[in-house]
């Protein structure tokens, strides 16, 4: 079906005067080449005829009607009996045909003597037409006659039907080999009231007439782009060129210097050689002015800005270029190692002295001294940034405790902001009962777990 649609399209284009593209022609050539080789080669075609010969053997049943009851008795035929004959067939369709056969079978009656059986029959053939190996079935009708001396079996003619299966192999466009197996159905005795069966196996060869002639192979234009360079030597056979290799002279980098004269055809440059002034690291600083010509850099000398001590602070911003910064939340932007001052250390971790009303986020007045101490440290060290974390014990539901711990942390933050600390320096988190530091199974442990912690934030 797909092939039929494609062929219909090609015919429509030809009728409309539209030229076939090289792609469609190439696909057609590819299909033709495929059919010329392999299992699809020489497959059956419509409106063809076959003329052939066959040889074979027939195995007759004990009881048969191949005798004249007026002159001789019914005698057994010696088995097998060899036969030969001619056949002719016509196939109006690739899968359906009609065939006529005529043959002769020298036979011997036991006892009796020699006789000649002859047959003429016709049948229809239904075959699979897709490949060069063609299985088929057939069925038809005809007659089988007898010629012999009266004392052997006499003369007789009987109708006989048959059906069978077989296979053909198309060796070439015209020559075919064939093998058949037939079931013959005939009368059992002279009365012709009963039937009997005989077996027939035939091998044959035939000639096929009427096949379509294969399309002549298209002649290839030896110089498709007509630029004076033969296809076999042309590196651009479908594009007219003016270079010795058959390709056009291009300007790949768009610098108006053709590739044939451009010593840098992939990098835009300037005349006369088409190359840019040398800048090996391509940082915009020509090698003549670049103090680091192998490393991309920045102004003023073309060298990269370095971080000598590897603390992720570039040397121009690093007060200690040979010593890495200590990331501890205290003066993390100066690039120097340091330790936390004692005053800062006292106000990190668990903060004792901050109390809240039972089940509430309001800070008790007894916490004022501790809270004011926190304000002083944050004002004395303005670079500090703090995370305020609220914790509870495990009494009650987790959801309620997480919410209560968050609100208590926010109450501490609000106190500090009210005392003049920038809110950008403060973060809050409610951990609820998830991070205990004591046993919640005792009253003392639960009291310890209800706490506020300060954690310094690093840059």
Image (cartoon, helix red, strand yellow):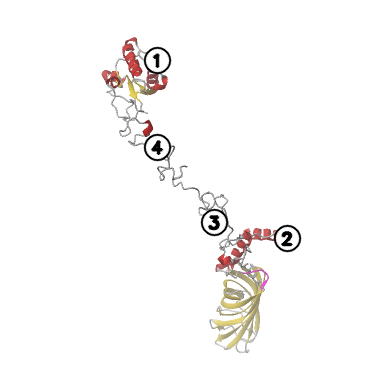
| Magenta residues (range) | 44-48
Secondary structure at numbered mark 3 = loop
Q: Quadrant of the C terminus?
A: top left
Asked whether disc 1 touches disc 3, contact meaning CB atoms under 8 Å apart, the reply is: no
Location of the N terminus (image quadrant): bottom right
Q: Splitting the image into 4 quarters, where does residue 172 fall? A: bottom right
Q: Secondary structure at mark 2?
A: helix
Q: Nearer the viewer, mark 1 or mark 2?
A: 1
- Is the C-beta separation of discs 2 and 4 under 8 Å? no
Foreground label between 1 and 3: 3
Mark 4 or mark 3: name the one nearer the start of the chain. 3
For marks 1 and 2 on the same chain, the one whose residue lies earlier in the sequence: 2
Query: Do tag 4 and tag 1 residues touch (Cβ < 8 Å)?
Result: no
Alpha-carbon span between mark 4 and mark 3: 39 Å
Q: Distance from label 1 to label 3 (Cα)?
A: 73 Å
Q: Residues within 10 Å of mark 1 (few under 14, many from 20)?
A: few
Q: Residues within 10 Å of mark 4 (few under 14, many from 20)?
A: few
Given this view, does label 4 or label 1 mark the residue nearer the observer?
Answer: 4
Tag shown at residue 15 = 2
Q: CB under 8 Å between callouts 4 and 3?
A: no
Between tags 4 and 3, which lies in front?
3
Closer-to-camera residue (380/440):
380
- Residue 351 position, x and y percent, is 30, 19
- Choose top left, top right, bottom left or bottom right for residue 219: bottom right
The residue tagged with tag 1: helix, strand or loop? loop
């Amino acid at each position: 079906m797909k092939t039929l649609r494609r062929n219909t399209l090609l015919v429509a284009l030809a009728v409309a005067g539209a030229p076939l593209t090289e792609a469609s022609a190439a696909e057609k050539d590819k299909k033709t080449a495929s059919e010329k080789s392999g299992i699809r080669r020489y497959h059956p075609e419509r409106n063809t005829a076959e003329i052939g010969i066959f040889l074979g053997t027939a195995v007759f049943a004990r009881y048969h009607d191949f005798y004249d009851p007026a002159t001789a008795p019914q005698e057994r035929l010696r088995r097998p009996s060899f036969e030969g004959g001619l056949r002719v067939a016509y196939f109006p369709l690739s899968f359906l045909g009609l065939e006529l056969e005529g043959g002769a079978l020298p036979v011997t009656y036991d006892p009796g003597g020699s006789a000649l059986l002859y047959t003429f029959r016709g049948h229809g053939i239904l075959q699979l037409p897709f490949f060069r190996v063609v299985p088929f079935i057939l069925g038809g009708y005809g007659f089988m006659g007898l010629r012999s001396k009266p004392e052997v079996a006499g003369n007789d003619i009987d109708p006989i039907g048959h059906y069978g299966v077989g296979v053909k192999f198309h060796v070439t466009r015209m020559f075919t080999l064939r093998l058949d197996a037939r079931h013959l159905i005939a009368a059992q005795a002279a009365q012709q009231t009963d039937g009997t069966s005989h077996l027939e196996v035939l091998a044959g060869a035939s000639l096929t007439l009427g096949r379509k002639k294969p399309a002549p192979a298209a002649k290839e234009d030896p110089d498709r782009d007509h630029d004076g360079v033969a296809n076999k030597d042309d590196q651009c056979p479908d594009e007219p060129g003016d270079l010795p290799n058959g390709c056009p002279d291009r300007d790949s980098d768009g610098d108006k210097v053709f590739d044939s004269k451009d010593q840098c055809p992939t990098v835009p440059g300037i005349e006369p050689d088409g190359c840019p002034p040398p800048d090996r690291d391509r940082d915009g600083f020509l090698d003549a002015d670049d103090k680091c010509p192998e490393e991309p850099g920045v102004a003023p000398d073309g060298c990269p800005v370095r971080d000598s001590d590897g603390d992720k602070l570039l040397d121009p911003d690093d007060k200690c270029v040979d010593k890495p910064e200590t990331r501890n939340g205290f003066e993390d932007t100066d690039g120097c190692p340091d330790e936390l001052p004692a005053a800062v250390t006292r106000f990190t971790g668990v903060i004792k002295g901050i109390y809240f009303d039972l089940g509430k986020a309001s800070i008790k007045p007894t916490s004022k001294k501790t809270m004011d101490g926190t304000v002083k440290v944050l004002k004395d060290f303005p670079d500090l940034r703090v995370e305020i974390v609220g914790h509870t014990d495990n009494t009650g539901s987790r959801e309620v405790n997480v919410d209560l711990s968050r609100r208590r942390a926010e109450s501490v933050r609000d106190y500090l902001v009210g005392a003049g600390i920038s809110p950008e320096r403060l973060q809050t988190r409610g951990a609820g009962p998830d991070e205990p530091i004591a046993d919640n199974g005792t009253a003392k442990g639960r009291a310890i777990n209800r706490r506020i912690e300060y954690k310094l934030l690093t840059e």
